[in-house]
Amino acid sequence: MKIYAYGIRDDEKPSLKEWETAHPEVEVAFTQELLTPETAKNAAGADGVVVYQQLPYTRETLQALADQGIHQMSLRNVGIDNIDLKAAKELGFKISNVAAYSPNAIAEHAAIQLARILCRSKELDAKVAKRDLRWAPTIGREVRMQTVGVVGTGRIGRVLIQILQGFGAKIVAYDIFKNPDIDKQGLYVDSLN
């Protein structure tokens, strides 16, 4: 079996080599180039390709792979909204993707960005760079004094709620598919408005 991976960054190469060593029955070739109709020829002889969600995978791109007998695509990301799924089905593609990224990592990133906005970090950093250490008028707000709306209470949303509750924020949540644990806490509202 041969796999051709597109868009491999320098930081991914050691992991790719480690995986290849652990699976000697699979030949792995890769490039830093992204998959396009033009670069599809690089995968000649491969059984499948591995890509990342950086470009739309159009009918033209999928056809370029199918013309070489390639009908398997694995995405190194969660979403598949950048794939022409109708074309993929018509061309007989099998598509796989990452089941989930770390909900904690994404929720923590969201919480950090929220805190940066509330603390007016960008403005304060600019003031400090000018040796201006006065707080006013750029005084930030505390998370514990905020009401935060969380839209979507799947894995990431639930972790974000826990983080924000840890800071003392009041939470209101919305999701068309209510989570029983969040529902028990009485956090849901009936509409996005």
Image (spheres, rainbow, N blue to C red):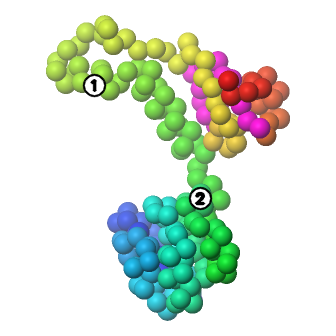
Residue under circle 1? 125
As rendered, which of 49 and 83 lies closer to the eye?
A: 83
Give the x, y percent position of residue 35.
44, 73
Q: Quadrant of the N terminus?
A: bottom right
Q: Earlier in the sequence, mark 2 or mark 1?
A: 2
Q: Is residue 150 left or right of residue 45?
A: right
Span colored in magenta: 159-176
Asked if residue 161 lies in the magenta stretch, the reply is yes
Q: Quadrant of the C terminus?
A: top right
Give the x, y percent position of residue 42.
41, 84
Q: Is residue 82 left or right of residue 43?
A: right
Based on the displayed image, in which of its 4 quarters is residue 132 positioned? top left
Residue 85 visible in the picture? yes
Q: Is residue 81 above or below residue 23?
A: above
Q: Which mark is residue 81?
A: 2
Name which residue type carries label 1. Answer: Asp
